Amino acid sequence: MTVVVAVLMIAAAGLLTAWLVERPSPPVHADPPPRPTFTLPTTPGSYLGVYGPGVPTSYASVNAFSARTGIKPRLVVYYSGWFESFKKRFAFTVARHGAVPLVQINPTGISLASIAAGKYDDYLTSYAEDVSSYHHPVILGFGHEMNGNWYSWGYRHTRPAVFIAAWRHIVRLFRELRVHNVTWLWTANVMHKSHTIPSPVRWWPGNSYVTWVGLDGYYYDPSWKFVPLFGPTIAAVRELTDDPILISETSAAPTTDQPAKIADLFAGIRLYGLLGFVWFNSVHNEDWRLNTPAAIAAFRRGAKMNHWPASRTSSRP
């Protein structure tokens, strides 16, 4: 009897060892699964967005923009500091107005290497769960304008490889948590030789980690036009990807002949077949708001040519 038991124990141990050896280990940070089936429309000229002061605490500036221009924005932007939660109440307000929230998450003063290493996964998990429970589309960006040198995560402050690692880690975490209502917006600043803003290609995380490309650029000078301002960066992006492109932050100073620049902006969107643009309707270094009847009229004409929806609360031009 003792011999039989011993034989059985040896056989069982052998089977257990074989099972442990043959059992595949779960992948650790494998490539993300295929993109979720939830996607926003990508028809060229589909989106006119706005950023206004006071968001996301208040929607008043967005309503004021609609009342002035007669246009109903399809995108509403706000900027979120690291450790801030997803502003779900504001997002529901955006949705009730028929728009999509676009959130630029800014990791100011945060080590991107630590993000990539998982140090902030508790925060990111909480954020992802809040976004998922919103059950409406959300556009998320992280570390925008990384090819500029004015942010802690940008050029000459954080290496492109570290930025890429952090970006990929965030996208993987959201996908592992099965958050399917996010459009990932990778946002670069337009290249500019005189301001030493290089091509964004070194910061590209790869097609499987990006849904849309965002480009930020402003009409600072009266001589600037869409093609030389945005064209070289669009060409550089097209060497990387065919993803849809959104002008994710733009405006024109009143001193640049604002009505002419607005017409040029709408024409550039049509010329390149871009998704649309977000107008920065606020004061930052300069007053970028639409403040004159001529600028507002130009905005209305451009929107009408692109068939963007009029606001129900405002009269048509």
Image (cartoon, rainbow, N blue to C red):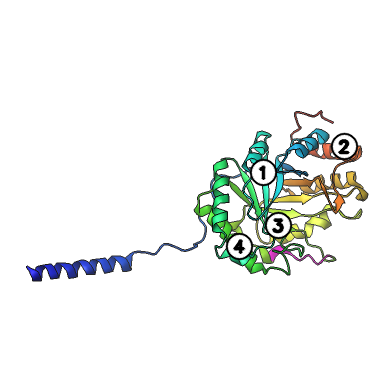
Q: Residue at x 59, y 48 (%)?
A: 182
Q: Nearer the viewer, mark 1 or mark 2?
A: 1
- State the image coordinates of residue 284 (x, y, percent, origin top left): 83, 52
* Mark 2 crowdedness (10 Å alpha carbons): few <14, some 14-19, many ≥20: some
Cα separation between marks 4 and 3: 13 Å
The quarter of the displayed image where residue 123 is located: bottom right
Q: Which residue lies under the disc numbered 3?
A: 144
Give the residue drawn at x 65%, y 41%.
91
Q: What is the crowding at mark 3: few (fewer than 14 residues within 10 Å), some, or many (at least 20)?
A: many
Q: Secondary structure at mark 2?
A: helix
Disc 3 or 1, which lies upstream in sequence?
A: 1
Q: Marks 1/2: CA distance?
A: 26 Å
The kind of secondary structure element at disc 4 is helix
Question: In the rendering, which numbered label is found on residue 297?
Answer: 2
Q: Are marks 2 and 3 in contact (CB under 8 Å)?
A: no
Q: Give the magenta part as a residue range.
A: 195-201
In this rendering, would 2 be left or right of 85? left
User: Mark 4 or mark 3: which comes first in sequence?
Assistant: 3
